[in-house]
Amino acid sequence: MVFLLGVIAIGLYMAWNIGANDVANAMGTSVGSKSLTFRQAVVLAAIFEFAGAVLVGTHVSETVRKGIVDPMHFVDNPQLLVVGMFAALLASALWLNVATFFGQPVSTTHSIVGSICGMGIIAGGAVKWHMLGNIMASWLISPVASGVMAFLMFRFITRRIFAVAEPGRAVEKHAPYFVVLVAFILTLSLIYKGLKNLHLYCPLHTAIIIAVAISAVAGGVAYLLFKRIANHTPKPILEDELAYVASHFKYLQIVTACYVAFAHGANDVANAVGPVAAVTEVYRTGEVTMEVAVPMWILLMGGVGIVFGLATFGRRVMETIGKRITEITPSRGFSAEISAATAVLVCSKCGLPVSTTHALVGAVIGVGLARGIAGLRIKTVRQILTSWIVTVPITAGLTMLIFAVAKWFVLRG
Amino acid sequence: MRLVGKFFGASPFKLLVEHTREVHECVKLVRPLTDALMARDYDKIEALHHEMSRLEHEADLTKAEIRDNMSKMFLLSVGRYQLDQFLSLQDNVADAAEDYAVVLLLRKTEVPPELNEDFVAFVSQIVLVSEHLLSLSEELSLLEETAFTGAEAKRVLDSIDNIGAEEWKADKLQRKFARGFYKMEDQLEPITIYFLDKYCHTLSEIANTAEKAAKFLRQLIVKR
């Protein structure tokens, strides 16, 4: 019983942590460039993180619950699964705190996957190595894919908007289409093989048609909204022209910030609630099952935790980001965010837990290769790479340690 | 992961413009130095040289700061070698200006009054070339925003070609001035001719180096 409460508590804590730290990455650019107030950012992030978590979060949560470690291994001894998940969550939370305390970048996704791996190993070889291999491959592929898309997107923006004679007119023309793109991918991800909890089923061609329709509507709305800020007379001074282009991209960046929040909610909520789902299942039925999908209330709980974390702690993080944000102009931010969000969302649909932040890093590098940014700090990139390599072994080891200690307590008592 | 704040490096272009401005301040002193020479105000030349040294030192500090920042970054939007060369050459422009001040300081040379006009025209043109370089440098931040493409990039590249033309004009004016004092060679002391020649040389060096710097600016824009 103690362990159940412990798991729920730490799960909530993880969700809070995710909300406080990670979400600021998505919303920070918009708050920093003053296109959104902090309050607006929190509301938008809340809506989209929540939506992502609840509507698309099942796929990755399933993987974390039963895709890395085989629950059937614990059929004869469900208590062990509970203790194991507790150890995994605790190890992850500890590692998150330690790394953040030392100012090092850390990925919640890598932490929890490493932890669960450790649990599987110490509980006697229950790790599904094949799945783990897929996950680790996705950790490599998702930043790369994100980078390629960002490179192409920014190249497109450079060639079709910045390089033409009248960038202002070009951005007016293209802006609604960017919104269409985001809406299309979002809608498709929602409808196709989605909404399991709402028991909707949709074959691919129908899903595409619906997505096209909805994104066309979104594009139309965007077009009208943009027209309200349209004020275009070709400006002789290039700075003014570029400022006009930037203002359009600031609004587009709000759209992509929400998009990133959605994708992030879909992928990262699992880091907090996947283990919780495994454990509550045991307590509910007294046994381990493979069949039931992650229950809605658990996803809701995760969503609430994330939003709560953002509302309470996110302000400070966003303010810090806002001060340092001058180096990434809206067009770059847009390219990076739309690519990262797409990569993460696609991985979420495939049930692959990936790091949203690494996808963003990959995207920024893609933009950099297209000459979009002045430069990246070597030191920070080195820290990220180190964290990438080090997180899984450390969390796995920590989990094994905690598990051994907890098991000793259980056996003793 | 509180990534976004620590990830990006500061753009080198702001500091680069700063450096160009400081170098141009050095070059601008060439005109008052020449006026002082022609007015035979040798105390003023000393004072101006002092000022020139100070400005050149400031430029050096900025250069060091830029190099320091650059060493901490990767994936720059411009070629690292080209940026470094541009910086070096700009530094040489300031050095050349200081050389001129030093030469003026060495000896109380008297410039023949008949040549004043030609001399002033020559010096003014040198300063113009440096002004040109400064205006180019100031365009760099805009270019950064457009990722070095578009009409602006084309305009700047054409402008770089113009510096070549301005430098050529400077050469012509130098030749006119030189022919002037060689025509008078029987009336002038050899040592005077020697120093007039030194003035030509150091002044030309300013414009030549400025033009070379502009060429690297072209590389900065075109390549990554």
Image: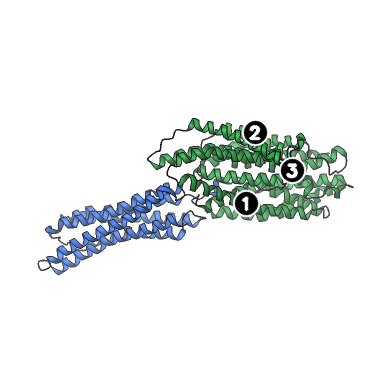
Is B163 displayed left or right of A405 in the figure?
left
Task: Kindly report which numbered mark, 1 or 2, lies closer to the viewer in this rendering.
Answer: 1
* Residue at (85% x, 37% y) in the render: A284
As drawn, A56 above or below B28: above
As drawn, A62 above or below B196: above
N-terminal label among 1 and 3: 3
Q: Nearer the viewer, residue B55 or A296?
A: A296
As drawn, A249 above or below B134: above
Residue B122, percent from left and from top: 21, 57
Number of residue marks: 3
Secondary structure, mark 1, is helix
Residue at label 1? A145
Q: Nearer the viewer, residue B160 or A223?
A: A223
Label 1 and label 2: CA atoms lie apart by 27 Å
Kind of residue at badge 3? His
N-terminal label among 1 and 2: 2
Label 2 and label 3: CA atoms lie apart by 19 Å
Q: Quadrant of residue A78?
A: top right
Is A265 displayed left or right of A118 in the figure?
left
- Residue A47 is marked as 2
Q: Which chain is green?
A: A
